[in-house]
Amino acid sequence: VNQVLVAAYLLGARDLDWESFRPLALLVRVAAVLAGKSTLEAENLKDLLTSVRETPGSVSVGYSDSRLERIFLATLETNAKVSFDRKAFETGVDMFTALLEKRVDLGFISVPAARRRIQDGKLKAFGVSTAERIASLSDVPTLAEQGGFSFGYDLGLIVAKGTPVELVDHLAAIFEKAVEDKLLVDELGENGIMIHFLASDPYTRYLEDLRADWRKLLGTEDSDKKPGDKLPPVKGQKS
């Protein structure tokens, strides 16, 4: 699972929160690249954000119509104090196609997709989402380096809530050993997948903190109820 388990609950799309399960272990963080169409005038994130602050809504951002991506975009806008023109697409492939066809200005895409399209000049890279640079895109700075924040798609494992602690710890130890393999670490790293291991207890605290942070973002930190969709409505037409 990834953070969508938290996002979907907070936005009223699911009745089950992560507390309906027992967190087993967080394994990896998958990076995203903020990429733009090749004809954008801005050459770096600072210039891009300055342009959007001067003219709110002047730059469009495409995304697949998922609650997790909407929260990522809301966090980016809040952190940078900007307002993009949001355009939702049914799938990530649809969004990526629109980006290549210059029907949207920006979008978060995978490291392999970004690497190929940046090399052939079809897209510009404004930053990678993880805290550290990606080896295969070493010239692309992180968003955090440029005054932004770090995030990614954090993939972990959950089990049934009543699973015995001994079994949880045993399974977590097996996965922890597996992600220490250097060949695996290097191969995953080339594609923007960073080892981010947390055993059951720290993974639980991570999810608690994430829920608290997103409740604050959504303006519902004082409520124990699901807020429903508190994000700004999507602008533009869904493709």
Image (cartoon, rainbow, N blue to C red):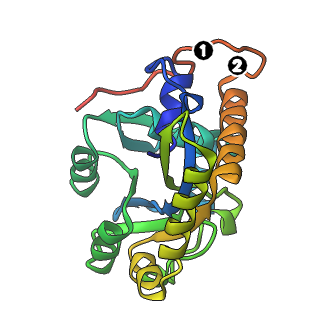
Q: Which mark is residue 227?
A: 1
Compared with 215, 42 (above or below) is: below
Q: Which residue is drawn at 28% across and 47% down?
A: 92
- Say which element carries label 1: loop
Judge left or right: residue 231 versus residue 146. left
Q: Which of 135 and 172 is in front in this view?
A: 172
Q: Nearer the viewer, residue 20 or 183?
A: 20
Residue 35 placed where, x, y %?
Answer: 41, 61
Residue type of the residue flagged with mark 2: Thr
| Label 2 sits on residue | 220
Gap between marks 1 and 2, in whole Å?
Answer: 7 Å
Residue 98 placed where, x, y %?
Answer: 24, 48
Quadrant of image for the C terminus = top left
Residue 219 placed where, x, y %?
Answer: 71, 22
The 10 Å Cα crowd at callout 2, few under 14, some 14 to 19, many 20 or more, is: some
Q: Could you say which quadrant of the image residue 144 lies in?
A: bottom right
